[in-house]
Image (spheres, coloured by chain):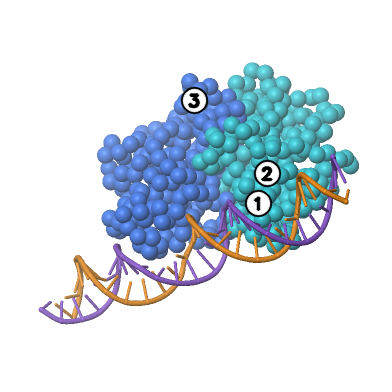
Chain colours: A blue, B cyan, C orange, D purple
Amino acid sequence: MEYKVTFQVNESVYLRNPETSEIGKNLIKQSIDLVYELGFEHFTFKKLATQAGTTEATVYRYFENKHRLLLYIISWYWFYIDFLLDYNLQNITNPGKKLEAVIDLLTHELPEGSGGLDYNKKYLNSIVIAESSKVYLIKEVTEINQHQVFKPYKDLCAKIASIISEYNPAYPFPKSLSSTIIETSHHQQYFSEFLPRLTDADQAGKDEFTSRFISSLVFKVLG
Amino acid sequence: MEYKVTFQVNESVYLRNPETSEIGKNLIKQSIDLVYELGFEHFTFKKLATQAGTTEATVYRYFENKHRLLLYIISWYWFYIDFLLDYNLQNITNPGKKLEAVIDLLTHELPEGSGGLDYNKKYLNSIVIAESSKVYLIKEVTEINQHQVFKPYKDLCAKIASIISEYNPAYPFPKSLSSTIIETSHHQQYFSEFLPRLTDADQAGKDEFTSRFISSLVFKVLG
DNA sequence: TAAAAAAGATAGCTTTACTATCACATGAGA
DNA sequence: TCTCATGTGATAGTAAAGCTATCTTTTTTA
């Protein structure tokens, strides 16, 4: 598949929209590489500036701080998943098949080379698994939530919830099940890689483990 | 209930065992207050030293850095939950009732005034919900995992997994379901408080929501 | 009561997380 | 062509965070 899409991340996430310049797009690209390599805690704007061949001052003209930059990356990912979900569900009418497609999307790496920008999908996936909860597990959550910065995540959650309700209209917790599926897909992927004792994954079938576990869970819960 | 227990947190988490001195115990107590108040990102050893009426140098003699201190607090909590679980399950033989007791423990605040040390249970609960994943979502996870620092969490997870298997010996993912229950109880409590759109909680029944959701989920999954 | 261990006091160092300023390049509009 | 807004580079500087080191004093305990 080949297509060109751009996602409009909420304005209050950035100071200058990185998608409007080559330097900006490169900053995001290099950020993904660097956060993947160093982990978010060891990632700094100085290192990013060096990696991207620009200056710290320029980076600060795009983002207030590294948390906002992470929020940008994660929002972009959520938009992208939302888009891919629409794309993948196009020709599916059976709600059960739709749920399978959802789980498949959440538990597998993104296809490389797709999407409007050529960010490294493998790295992006790892970042989302290991770092995404850090965008909302902060003291400022209520304040920044008022600026709608979590809208992409909420929209995706609502979309999956509506599929859940389509499959079983009587199920009373579609949104909580939806957010649980998303979060659990991250946790179980992370655990099976780094803390396997917290899972039932065997190292051989590790890649397919999370989707099998979540599939089993979802369809038992929904009957 | 009234009892006195001490938990031996893994030695490689601290430099000097804080439970062996008044200053050490006070450091933990003040840390819990301060991390609750500021959030982990804004918490520093300098602020802790001031709050505890001691010096930064002394704090560094107990813990290598603030991450280790958080790990200490979270480990202590996991030990404590493990202990409470044994205590609460003493007179229960029915596996279904045991599972209910597990869910109840994970989704409600700890009883105040119990436990060996009088840490603020309300604050401790909030910290675990908002900060506990930060102890393992780090680049150094594999390295520190080799020093068994996550053993309390793994032990608790294994204990709950064994109850799951007792309830339904045929269920193929007891450990993953166990870690999912633990993590989901944190997420859903956090979401229902700060990002309620990601849940089906109404503000009135917020407190009981998480336990109802997880109960429903677990018993449907296990049949 | 002497030695050992813990804590206090203080200093200092490097890095992080910014803010500020000025000069230079570029491109769009008058 | 001028010019003026916008973006970037280069550089400097500041406050706080995240340590390490040293020396003295107090407290334990052997």
Say which residue label 1 marks.
Answer: B60
Q: Looking at the picture, how far across and down is residue C23, in whole percent?
A: 27, 74
Residue A191 found in image quarter: top right
Image quadrant of residue B172? top right
Q: In this view, does A20 lie to the left or right of D27?
A: left
Tell which tag, 3 or 2, sits nearer the viewer: 2
For the question of whether residue B36 can be seen, the reply is no
State the residue at coordinates (27%, 42%): A3
Amino acid bearing label 3: Lys
In the image shown, does A121 or C11 lie closer to the viewer? C11
Which percent across, then down, holds residue B170? 64, 18
Q: Which mark is residue B15?
A: 2
- Label 1 sits on what residue type? Tyr
Q: What is the secondary structure assignment of the residue under circle 3?
A: helix
**Residue at disc 1, secondary structure:** helix
Q: Counting residues from the N terminus, which is met first, the one under dot 2 or under dot 1?
A: 2
The front one of A185 and B151 is B151
- Disc 3 from disc 1: Cα separation: 40 Å
- Image point 30% across, 46% down: which residue? A116
Where, by quadrant of the figure, is residue B53 drawn? bottom right
